[in-house]
Structure formats: structure tokens, C-alpha cells
Amino acid sequence: MTAYDDLMAHARETEALAQVAGRLGWDQETMMPRGAAAQRGEESAAMEGVLHARRTDPRIGDWLERAEAPDDVAAANLREIRRAYARANKVPARLAAEIARVTSVAQGTWAQARADEDVGAFLPTLARVVALRQEEGQALAGGGDVYDALLDDYEPGARAAELDAMFGALRPRLVSLREAIRERPRPEALSGAFDEAAQLALTRELAEIFGYDMARGRIDKAVHPFCSGSGNDVRVTTRTDPEDPFNCLYSTIHEVGHASYEQNVDPDYLLTPIGRGVSMGVHESQSRIYENQLARSPAFAGWLLGRMRDAFGDIGIADPTEFARAVNRVSDGYIRTESDEVQYNLHVLMRFDLERALISGDLAVEDLEAAWNDRFAADFGFAVDRPSNGCLQDVHWSVGLVGYFPTYSLGNVYAGCLHEALRKARPGLDDELARGDLSGATGWLRETVQRHGALRGPRETVQAACGFAPSEAPLLDYLEAKFGALYDL
């Protein structure tokens, strides 16, 4: 056994335990009894303690010193282990366990406060979460930028200043496009009876069409749709709305994009450091290109119209062009996850700025609701009506995911680049989508992005797939062309 072999055996066991810990989180969101929240917090803290001990095991440092990489795969594994080891050793075990315990309980507190429309009931818990993440960020930053240190957990190598410049370039053209659309007539809306069982049946069909392997996954209901797991156990959740089947269908397709990434990583990488998505930005590029550039394309919408009429009967729209406009309807709304493509990034940019202010201390937690409401009114032109449509709508801050939000917009940027490259690689893509055939598109994404896992860094992964460096230009060009045609701009 070489030092590399010993190191990888340890890493595989650690990753297997991390998957078990992740399953606790999935269960908490889907099936766990409400009364088990406090106990689950202790269980999660215990698991985090075990994982932290393994990730900071002094033997890792010795193995890293002696390990030699025989090939590119081994070199990538060593890179990821070295990075994780350095970060884990900067965070005290006490702090890691406390973050796991507090965020596990905070999730339930947030859910209850959201149901009760009671921001005050959540703020003390949020203040504790923010304080813990500030402490963690300070430990990781070593005197550098605290927010950058937290961001690095989700998008290795990214820096807030660079993202700020990219987002600054997005904002003017997005706002200009939205204002032009607001002057055009609204698309027709769906009408009819959208039975939950029928929604879930169609959702399962769509998941399989988009390549989700149900033999290695499952679809359940949750308050906030998400994807969990990797390799041979990748699970997604969705939600239903009796008046809006698009909520269920497109949330599922979005999560299937995430799940397909995890299921399609080279099986030789299973339970290794590179056997998962390389970053949340690249992960989001997969979910967004599945949901938007593919599933919301006018070509695929024409096929989906027929399936929806089969599933629900009369849905109030029979014309494919009008249905494509309904699928891509741009309308005022509060909820990020339900937002149209034009305005989605404006929701994310707001959260990016607010959480940076929370971590820096420029925004006190007790002032968050007012700051959110003021910023929302300025960005969207109307007032927040209730907390569940405002600062209580997202689960992220309750579970400590600070630095996560900007990866959503970065994922959109990456998706724009990948879509441009996909169109060049498959000039007959629209004909395929019109037949409900996603195999060409998802196959291209599997081969160019997904199967590589974390073999390369995030930007390198996208650049290798596209043949050019990522930028916001392809996304903006795509949005202006698509919505210009749909709204006769």
C-alpha cells in the first residue's frame, strides 16, 4: 500500500459517512416527525464531530507529504484533499459541531416562523447562525476577506469582488429587458383542474425523459425542492400547487439537472473527492440549462403542451405559441424559485448584497426585514406583502448556507455559455426538443461536463466544455433573443 492508497481509503470512508450525514438532512426535510427536531440536531452534531475528526486526522498531512500522483485523476484527488484538509484544520471541532447542531434546529424554527408569518420568532436563531458563520469565516480567512472565505466553500476560487463586477454587468440589461416586457400584453394563464397525483405522475415522466435514473433515485415532496446525495443514491424533492402545475414540473426538472450531474459522474470516481459536482455554480448550470434553455424552449413547450392536455384535459390554452409564452411568462412576483428567467437573477443579486452586509456587520440581523423590504421595493417596484414572501422565503440562511446565493447567478452565467456551445454542437437541437427527445442535449452535457465531476476546477470545467472563457454575455444575448421573440420586442 502506498501513501496515496492509504489516503484514498481514508477519503472513501469519510465520504461514505458524509453521505450518511446527508441522508439525515434529506429525512429531516421529507419524513422526519416534527417532534424529532431537537434530537436530530444532536445526531447531526455527533456526525459532524466524527467527520471533522476524520477530516483533520494528522495522518492526512503525513500521507499528503508522501503521496505521489500517477495520473491526472490522482492529482485531482490530491488537490481536493489538500484543500479540504487545510480548511478543516482552520475550523475548531467545537465550532464545526456547534454549527451543525444550531443549523439543524434552526431549520425547524425557520419553517415554523415562515408558517406563522413571524419574523421575530426566527431572528434570534438567525443571529446565532450568522455569528457562528462569522466566526467560521474569520477562522478560514486568516485575516483576509471573511465573506470570500465562506464563498470558497461553494465556489472554489471565486471572489466576491469579481462576482460583483459580473453581476453589475447583468443588472442594467436585465432591468431594461424587464421594463420593455412590462409594456407588452400579458400572456394567457393556465386554467383548469390540476390534480396532485396527475402532477406527480407527469413529473416522474419528465424526470426520466431528462435522464434521471429512478433505480438510483426517488422523488418526494418537501417545502423547498432540493437534491441530495451522489453516485448511486441521488434523491430529489418537489412540491405541488393545485392552481399552478408549472411549479411542480419545472421545480422537478431543475432538481433533476442537479441529480443527473451527480448520477453521471464517472463511476470510477465513486466516493472519492472528485466523485461529485465541482462547485455549486457548475451544479446550478446543469439545473438551469435543464429547466430553462431546454425545458422552457418554445420547441420543447410545444411537446409539453400535448402531454399536459393528456394529463389534465383542458388547461385553458391550446395554441403552442401561446403555451410557450405562458411557460415563459414574465410577471411580478415575490418568490425567487418561482421567478421567470428575466427577473430571477435580480432576486439573487439582492440576497448576495444582503448576506455580505450581514457577515461584514454592516447590517444587523434585527434590521434584516426592513432592509430586505426596502431593497425589494427598489429592485422590483412593489412592496413585500408578508414575511413568507420576503426574508423568510428561503431556507438557506437558516441552515447556514452563507455564500451560496451568488452561485445561483453564476450558474445561470455558466448555463448561458454551455447553451451557446450546445447549439453549435447540435444544430438540430430544436427538432429534437420538439419530439420530446432530450437524449442528445443531456448526452452532450453528460460527456462535456457531468462525467468529469471535480476533475477540473469550476471555471476550467466550463471552459473545457465550451471552448471559451465564461462570461455573462451569452446569457444576456440568449435572454434578449428569446424574450424579444416571445414578446415581439
Image (cartoon, rainbow, N blue to C red):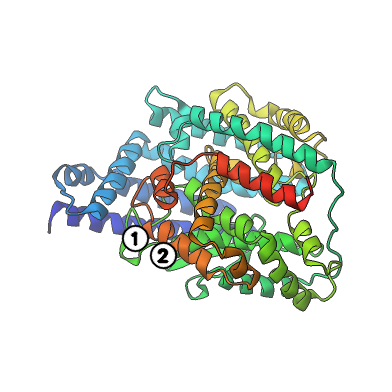
The image position of residue 65, as x and y in percent, is 16, 42
* Label 2 – label 1 distance at C-alpha: 8 Å
User: What amino acid is labelled 2 in the image?
Assistant: Gly
Question: Which comes sooner in the sequence, label 2 or label 1?
Answer: 2
In front here: 452 or 169?
Answer: 169
Q: Secondary structure at mark 1?
A: loop
Q: Give the residue at x 66% y 46%.
A: 479
The image position of residue 475, as x and y in percent, is 59, 44
Q: Which residue is denoted by mark 1 in the rendering?
A: 271
Indicate whether 328 appears above or below 179.
below
Q: Mark 2 near mark 1, Cβ–Cβ under 8 Å?
A: yes
Determine which quarter of the picture holds residue 334. top right
The image position of residue 333, as x and y in percent, is 78, 45
User: What amino acid is labelled 1 in the image?
Assistant: Leu
Residue 35 showing in the rendered view: no
Indicate whether 56 appears above or below 307.
above
Crowding at mark 1 (Cα within 10 Å: few <14, some 14-19, many 20+): many
